[in-house]
Image (spheres, helix red, strand yellow):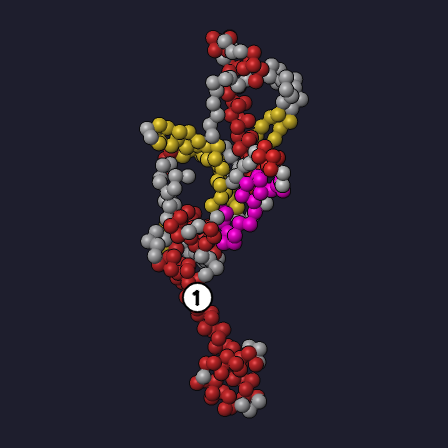
């Protein structure tokens, strides 16, 4: 949000109920909600937190929604828009409830007719909602990044009048190295390991140049699930050396490769022996290129 500047401190975050629920009433139902036909919409976010951000001597209050995705959701802009809209509906409803609780008091008596009907007064304000999408996948996010991406509008006038709704996506594959460094939590290591999960050499380089691979168990578990890195935790451990675990994984892969190569060569020797091609066996032992030719010849 702040280009790497740590404006939001962990102790300033407060976990909220991730359930987004709204009760939709008819237009003229404000005065008697008990007898009105209503429709309930309920959705569940992954996480919702409130934050107080200090900037230029002023405190800004925001609600941060987090959506964790392991696969692309091709309707993500609509999904986020619904979550955010439901949260705003909840805020309006709560503010209206506060005003109704003031019935008989000066504030309630001074409300205009329009304020009384809507339940929301002219000077009431909402808390902004920002929803982040974390994509835990090494593949490219090929889904829409805004509501407009989900539409096919060729008419420029229509396009100008249709409101857009972007998603705020953290996609490991598209993150540059300098962007990874902007993360202050273990999310940096998680995203980096996902980004390079399909390239063992780059993964090893990322690990060796990163001094923060001793991470929380929860972060290590995420890497384990996505990168298939075996984790052996000591009972009661709160930290885990992911650097050591991934180095062991890479070494295991090399060992498996050596064993597979040895098996192929042994099969080649057996096949050449059956055809009495002892000279080829000797030549293949000394000439790697010729050895590869023979392996292709026997489809090994």
x, y percentage for residue 56? 33, 30
- Provide the residue designation for mark 1: 252
Which segment is the magenta one? 134-153
Looking at the image, which is closer to me, 37 or 147?
A: 147
Q: Is residue 41 visible?
A: yes
Residue at 44% x, 68% y: name it: 254
Magenta-span inclusion, residue 123: no
Picture quadrant of residue 204? bottom left
Residue at 46% x, 81% y: name it: 288
Q: Provide the major secondary structure of the magenta segment.
A: loop
User: In screen coordinates, is 96 left or right of 2?
Assistant: right
Picture quadrant of residue 117? top right
Residue at 45% x, 61% y: name it: 199
Q: Is residue 234 visible?
A: no
Vertical relation: 160 (above or below) 27:
below
x, y percentage for residue 14? 42, 33
Vertical relation: 257 (above or below) 109:
below
Which quadrant would the N terminus be assigned to in this image? top left
User: In screen coordinates, is 225 left or right of 37?
Assistant: left
Which quadrant would the C terminus be assigned to in this image? bottom right
């Amino acid at each position: 949000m702040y280009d790497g500047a740590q404006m939001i401190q962990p102790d300033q975050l407060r976990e909220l109920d991730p359930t987004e629920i709204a009760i939709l009433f008819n237009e003229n139902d404000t005065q008697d909600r008990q007898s009105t036909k209503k429709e309930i919409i309920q959705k569940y976010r992954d996480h919702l937190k409130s934050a107080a951000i200090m900037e230029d001597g002023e405190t800004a209050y925001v609600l941060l929604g987090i959506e964790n995705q392991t696969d692309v959701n091709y309707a993500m802009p609509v999904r986020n828009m619904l979550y955010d809209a439901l949260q705003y509906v909840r805020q309006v409803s709560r503010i209206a409830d506060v005003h109704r609780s003031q019935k008989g008091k000066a504030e309630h008596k001074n409300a205009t007719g329009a304020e009384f009907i809507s339940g929301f007064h002219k000077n009431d304000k909402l808390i902004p909602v920002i929803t982040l999408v974390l994509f835990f996948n090494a593949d490219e996010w090929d889904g829409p990044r805004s509501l407009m991406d989900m539409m096919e509008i060729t008419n420029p006038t229509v396009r100008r009048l249709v409101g857009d709704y972007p998603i705020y996506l953290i996609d490991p594959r598209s993150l540059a190295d300098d962007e990874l460094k902007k993360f202050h939590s273990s999310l940096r290591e998680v995203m980096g390991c996902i980004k390079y999960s399909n390239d063992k050499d780059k993964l090893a380089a990322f690990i060796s140049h990163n001094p923060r691979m001793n991470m929380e168990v929860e972060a290590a578990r995420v890497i384990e699930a996505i990168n298939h890195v075996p984790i052996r935790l000591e009972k009661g451990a709160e930290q885990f050396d992911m650097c050591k675990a991934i180095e062991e994984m890479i070494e295991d892969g090399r060992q498996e490769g050596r064993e597979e190569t040895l098996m192929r060569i042994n099969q080649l020797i057996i096949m050449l022996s059956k055809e009495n091609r002892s000279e080829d066996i000797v030549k293949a032992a000394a000439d790697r290129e010729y050895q590869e030719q023979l392996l292709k010849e026997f489809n090994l």
